[in-house]
Amino acid sequence: QVQLVESGGGLVQAGGSLRLSCAASGRTFSNYAMGWFRQAPGKEREFVAAISWRGDNTYYTDSVKGRFTISRDNAKNTVYLQMNSRNPEDTAVYYCAATISRLINVRRTDYDCWGQGTQVTVSS
């Protein structure tokens, strides 16, 4: 399995930008498709974005399309989530996840490995 560590969370004002990073170690990072999920207080963990193993395909949940961008650098074993035009509804703990399937996956159960999460808070 691959080990994942998220970073980059924090407090940002509405309309601001933030970039999350997820560093992977262990198995070959480029073998895995990657995803970002988030969990707001009192809510279930939900899919945000995913990227294929080569980075040539991406997919987003409707609420973040046009605002968030997922990308990866296989040479650095890192996946990113650039978040622009933040709003308070984006406040959540953000998790990165890896799946050996290599393809785009949107279900939590499709992912094999998870990071510990990073808190993102958007103030209005």
Image (spheres, rainbow, N blue to C red):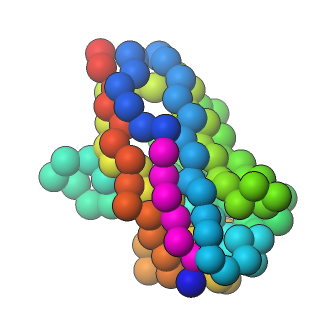
Above or below, comparing residue 41 to residue 114 in the picture: above
Closer-to-camera residue (25/93):
25
The image quarter in which residue 123 lies: top left
Q: Which residues are magenta?
A: 2-7
For this view, does 11 lie left or right of residue 43?
right
The image quarter in which residue 109 lies: bottom left
* Residue drawn at the location 31% of the way across and 53% of the way down: 39
Where's the N terminus, which quadrant? Answer: bottom right
For this view, does 48 lie left or right of residue 104?
left
Chief SS of the magenta region: strand
The image quarter in which residue 75 lies: bottom right
Q: Residue furthest left?
A: 42
Q: Residue furthest front?
A: 26
* Residue drawn at the location 49% of the way across and 76% of the way down: 113
* Residue drawn at the location 53% of the way across and 23% of the way down: 17
* Percent position of residue 79, x then y: 65, 54
Residue 110 seen: no
- Does 81 appear in magenta? no
